[in-house]
Amino acid sequence: MCERCHWVDLTKADYVAYHDEEWGVPVYDDDTLFEFLTLESAQAGLSWYTILKKRDNYRKAFANFDARKVAAFDDKDIERLLADEGIVRNKLKILATINNAQRFLEIQHEFGSFSDYQWQFVGHKPRVNSIRSKADYVATSEQSDTFAKDLKKRGFKFLGPTTVYAHMQACGMVNDHHDDCYRKEEVLAMYK
């Protein structure tokens, strides 16, 4: 049996697949980054697994995470989303997603891509942390604090330092796989 990060619930096949296939893999595609940002902001105050189970519903509800389409959502779309039982029906989070799509497009225009903007916070190279026990996991970092502060300055919502750090872990800006996890070295090999 493969050794995995301590946080993975091995009784949930979709959770295991997320860990084994996605978590911590460097992402440079803007559409995927918008998806991850949206899902992380939806997760604020909830468990990640709650959002992971609703991911396909989020894709349908939010135009397959096409930031241009989401940025143009209107009151009719907001009412549709508030009635959608497949997502978290929190009006503030729904409004934040539309707002964040608009801010996302502004950053793309300014930097050429959201990816170029985002990866600057780690010097365009994934950070690798040594994780030997649950106590070694952190909720924020200097980089997530700086990234979150800049996002807030640019008008983003529901993306504080803890949520941004989770985003950084998910999209590979930070490799926080446990040192004994078989994925740590596999992910490292992707960018060496």
Image: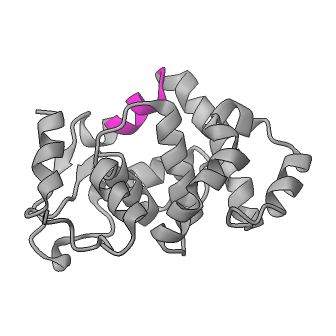
The picture places residue 86, in percent across and down from the top left corner, at: 70, 62
Magenta region: 112-119
Along the horizontal axis of the image, is 56 left or right of 131? right
Give 26 or 124, whichever is nearer the viewer.
Answer: 26
Q: Considering the image in quadrants, where does the N terminus appear?
A: bottom left
Q: Is residue 167 above or below residue 27?
A: below
Along the horizontal axis of the image, is 129 left or right of 19? left
Along the horizontal axis of the image, is 180 left or right of 27? left
Q: Is residue 138 above or below residue 19?
A: below
Q: Residue at x 85, y 48 (%)?
A: 77
The picture places residue 93, in percent across and down from the top left corner, at: 68, 61
The picture places residue 175, in percent across and down from the top left corner, at: 21, 52
Q: Considering the image in quadrants, where does the C terminus appear?
A: top left
* Picture quadrant of residue 6: bottom left
Q: How is the image coloured?
A: one colour
Q: Is residue 47 above or below residue 146?
A: below
Give 35 or 13, whichever is nearer the viewer.
Answer: 13
Give 94 or 86, whichever is nearer the viewer.
Answer: 86
Of all residues shown, which one is farthest toward the right?
Answer: 76
Q: Residue at x 24, y 36 (%)?
A: 123
The picture places residue 55, in percent across and down from the top left corner, at: 57, 55
Q: Is residue 21 above or below residue 104?
A: below
Most common SS among magenta residues: helix
Q: Residue at x 45, y 62 (%)?
A: 163
Q: Residue at x 32, y 53 (%)?
A: 23
Instruction: Tell me, yes or no, whether the highlighted magenta stretch contains residue 38.
Output: no
